[in-house]
Image (spheres, rainbow, N blue to C red):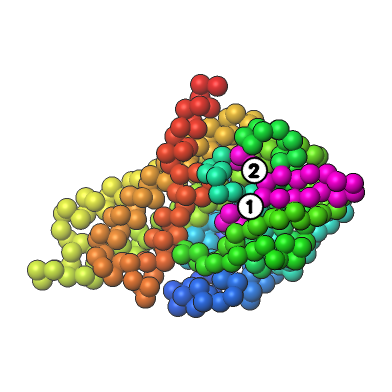
Amino acid sequence: MNFELSDERKMLQETLSRFLSDHYSNAVVNELNNTEHGFSHEIWAGMADLGIFGALFSEEHGGFGGEGFDIALVFEELGRVGAVDPVLDSVLLAGGLLAELGSDDQQAMLEPLLAGQTQWAFAHSEPNSRYELNRVQTTATLEGDHYVLSGHKALVVNAACADFMIVSARTSGDVSDHQGISLFLLPANLMAQGLQSYNLGTGGRACELSLDNIKVPADSLLGEINQAYDSIEKITACATVAVCAEAIGLMDAIKQLTIDYLKVRTQFGQPIGKFQVLQHRMADVLIEIEQAKSAVVNLAGHIDAERQEREKHVSATKNLVGLVAKLVVEESVQMHGGIGVTMEYELGHLVRRLTLVDHRFGDSTHHLERYIELAVA
């Protein structure tokens, strides 16, 4: 496997890195936390103009990338500055499902999404689903020429700002069956009355979505009826690459902040970075970060593999990255002391976002158990 970036990816990385460095700071993040949508539309439009969203899709769907390494590159840079833009949920998840399953008319909606002109959300998680993608209690019942949706969706990121929403619902089978799940592409204003919006502690906003007998046209179905699970699992694997790569960017930024702090914080008349015990602890952190990087590269290279092999790499990587993230958070905060968790210091935001990584798409314990199940299957 070639670990070197191609010339095109190097150019993309440098462009995105410069743009984010110019537009992001801890003060900007704190300011965005108090806005209605939780992110900057100016930054969003800037990334779209640079073609960053197009890197997440193949040429067939209007992009110029779409491979695991393209996804990892973009999200590592986003993680490096602690970006709060809903690229993962609006573009990669919702847009990925649209590209995977949409009809010609539906896929035409990708163009304004990649141009930064529309916002999307994916409503799938439920209060009782934990990390099980197949556990869907929301129902969709066909009545004449429309479906009636009933249920509750939890932690729908970017829903309050979305123009369109993709909603999962069970059209047949029991609550935990893999078959019987369908997706519906809907205008977000159709569900506006059922939204309860709130700030996320790591930046951005999410909603609880109550579906109380919402009538939707039968042609709002995305893909084939009852057959959505495989596509949801596949796009969640891509999202896992993204969130693990974001974690790498966060770890690198936290590592550098910690090293810089050890050089300037003095105790007993010398920088605390000269104390051997702290050097040893920092060395352990650096080794673990490098191991996590290798795991993410490995996952990115297997994102198009057969389902069984792909999902084993997903769980192995997510388990390792979750454990390393916990170590990096604990060590960096402990080496900084109280300043490390203040809102005024950049580290506080970065460690909160890195902590969240272990809870998106399954924590390290969940994926350890899942890997064992996949290995013996």
Quarter of the image where the N terminus is located: top right
- In this rendering, does residue 371 appear at all? yes
- The residue carrying mark 1 is 152
- Viewer-nearest residue: 310 or 363: 363
* Above or below, comparing residue 35 to residue 285 in the picture: below
The numbered disc on residue 246 is: none
Q: Residue 203: x and y, percent?
A: 50, 66
Q: Residue at x 90, y 46 (%)?
A: 144
Q: Residue furthest right?
A: 145
Residue flagged by tag 2: what amino acid is it? Gln
Residue flagged by tag 1: what amino acid is it? His
Label 1: state its secondary structure.
strand
Quarter of the image where the C terminus is located: top right
Earlier-in-chain disc, 2 versus 1 = 2
- The residue carrying mark 2 is 137
Q: Residue furthest top?
A: 376
Q: Residue at x 64, y 64 (%)?
A: 195
Q: Left or right? Give the position of 121 relative to 275.
A: right
Q: Residue 173: x and y, percent?
A: 71, 33
Label 2: state its secondary structure.
loop
* Above or below, comparing residue 293 to residue 165 in the picture: above
Query: Distance of mark 2 from mark 1, alpha carbons?
Result: 8 Å
* Above or below, comparing residue 173 to residue 208 in the picture: above
Q: Residue at x 58, y 54 (%)?
A: 154
Question: Which residues fall within the magenta stretch?
Answer: 133-156
| Contact between labelled residues 1 and 2, with CB atoms less than 8 Å apart | yes
The reply to whether the magenta stretch includes residue 74 is no
- Viewer-nearest residue: 199 or 75: 199
The secondary structure making up most of the magenta span is: strand
